[in-house]
Image (cartoon, helix red, strand yellow):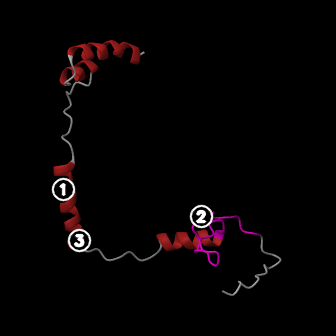
Amino acid sequence: MDPLPEVKEHPTCRPNPPRAVSLGVHCLQGVLCIPQANGLLNQECGLGYRLCRAMPKVNTKVLRRFRGFVQYLLKVLLPEIIPADYDFSPKAWTLKTHYPLWRIVQLLLLVPVVQR
């Protein structure tokens, strides 16, 4: 391969700060495009592209399918909603576990130490 030609910078250009580091696997003859985030013009153009472009047309069929999928997730994958009168106390929790009695007593003796 031919070596890359020497590139001279314009005298009024200030050097760009580094925006990427080598992760070990790379090609010495090229660099991927990296946006220059510190330029005001670049920031204005990026903001205009993100906020001022025309919105795509709404596909109601796709929205209905998404709604059905979300309803399926809520019905099948979501755990039961906790009732308002559920007891979150350590005593109630330990009595619902399958620990032996000695372990339940040991855990309940730790509660005052933890709650201090």
> Per the image, is 53 magenta?
no
Q: Amino acid at mark 2?
A: Gly
Q: Nearer the viewer, residue 48 or 79?
A: 79
Above or below — where is 114 with respect to 29? above
For residue 58, side relative to residue 65 (left or right): right
Residue at the spot of label 2? 24
Crowding near the residue tagged with mark 1, few <14, some 14–19, many ≥20 C-alpha atoms within 10 Å: few
Residue at the spot of label 1? 71
What element does badge 2 sit on?
Answer: loop
- Asked if residue 115 shows in the view, the reply is no
Q: Residue reaching furthest bottom?
A: 2
Residue drawn where x is 59% and y is 64% of the image = 24
For residue 5, side relative to residue 22 (left or right): right
Label number found at residue 62? 3
Q: Which residues are magenta?
A: 15-40
Crowding near the residue tagged with mark 2, few <14, some 14–19, many ≥20 C-alpha atoms within 10 Å: few
- Asked if residue 39 shows in the view, the reply is yes
Query: Splitting the image into 4 quarters, where does residue 43 fall?
Result: bottom right
Q: Position of residue 101 (x, y in %)?
A: 21, 15
Label number found at residue 18? none
Residue drawn where x is 71% and y is 64% of the image = 17
What element does badge 1 sit on?
Answer: helix
